[in-house]
Image (tube, helix red, strand yellow):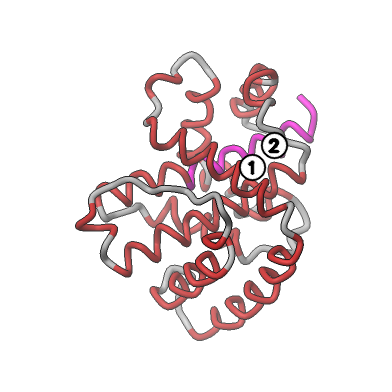
Amino acid sequence: MSSREKEQAIALSAIFQAAELVSILSKTGKVDNVNLQPMIDSILMVNANSTVDIYGGQWDYQSNLSAGRDIAKKALGKDRNSVNPDTLRYALSLVHLENKLSKTPEMLSSIGPKIAQIEQKKAHYDSVLHENMIASISGMYQDTLSTLPFRIQVRGDSRFLQQPQIANQVRAILMSGIRAAMLWRQLGGKRWHLIFKRKALLAALESRD
């Protein structure tokens, strides 16, 4: 297993974790903050020294992305049918949407300053999960990715999705998924790898190094 494949596995785990969180939140109105926190943190990690640092560092990234890693292993392995279809759809949609973003340099260049502004706000709150922080990240998603022709259609319970706070959480999680998909692309990941490089990616996902 190459170091590049290990890093791709980390990005892939994060994509699937974001996809699963959106699926759960849209249907139940609740999400586990243990799985949510590292995803939201990752959005603000723009100058990380390594891929593992984006998701908590060498000692924490495995546990921080454990939910996503387990789903990614099922999706690429023999248990694909046990994965929630919406989770699969969101994961593939995140990769597709990020690809559209990568071809829109003006939008890409506008995201950096927006992240910097949100980073400055963090000092005023006790957690990146504060509703004002989530609302700011949601606003960034609305101002940028929501304006592209391709949009991710979130399915769920309208009783929850119509609540502004939950809608903000959904968009913030989608933003974290875009962050992961961007990392996946920067590491050389491509959509066809999910079919033709399954064995190597599975090996990397199953590694505990």
Judge by depth and name the residue closer to the eye, 196 or 204.
196
Which residue position holds label 1? 11
Instruction: Name the quadrant containing residue 117.
Output: bottom right
Image point (28%, 47%), residue name: 156
Main secondary structure found in the magenta portion:
helix
Residue at x-position 40% and y-position 62% = 169
Q: Is residue 2 magenta?
A: yes
Where's residue 107, x and y in %? 69, 65
Please indicate whether residue 107 sits to the left or right of residue 128 in the image.
Answer: right
Identity of the residue furthest to the bottom in this view:
124
Mark 1–mark 2 distance (CA, rounded to whole Å) = 5 Å
Q: Residue at x 41, y 48 (%)?
A: 153
Q: For the residue carrying disc 2, how many other residues have a C-alpha within 10 Å: few (<14), some (14-19), or many (20+)?
A: many
Front-most of residues 102 and 37: 102
Circles 1, 2 touching at the beta carbon (< 8 Å): yes
Kind of residue sitting beneath label 1: Ala
Task: Please tell me which residue lies in front, 67 or 95.
Answer: 95
Q: Residue 102: x, y in percent?
A: 72, 52
Badge 1 crowding class, 10 Å Cα cut-off, few under 14, some 14 to 19, many 20 or more, is many
Q: In what element is the residue under mark 2?
A: helix
Q: Which of the 4 image quadrants contains residue 45?
A: bottom right
Q: Relative to 3, does residue 144 appear above or below in the rendering?
A: below
Q: Quadrant of the C terminus?
A: top right
What residue range appears in magenta? 1-18
Residue at coordinates 71% horizontally, 49% vertically from top-left?
A: 51
Secondary element type, mark 1 = helix
As drawn, 1 above or below 153 = above
**Where is residue 14 drawn, in percent x and y?**
56, 44
Q: Kindly identify which residue carries mark 2.
A: 8
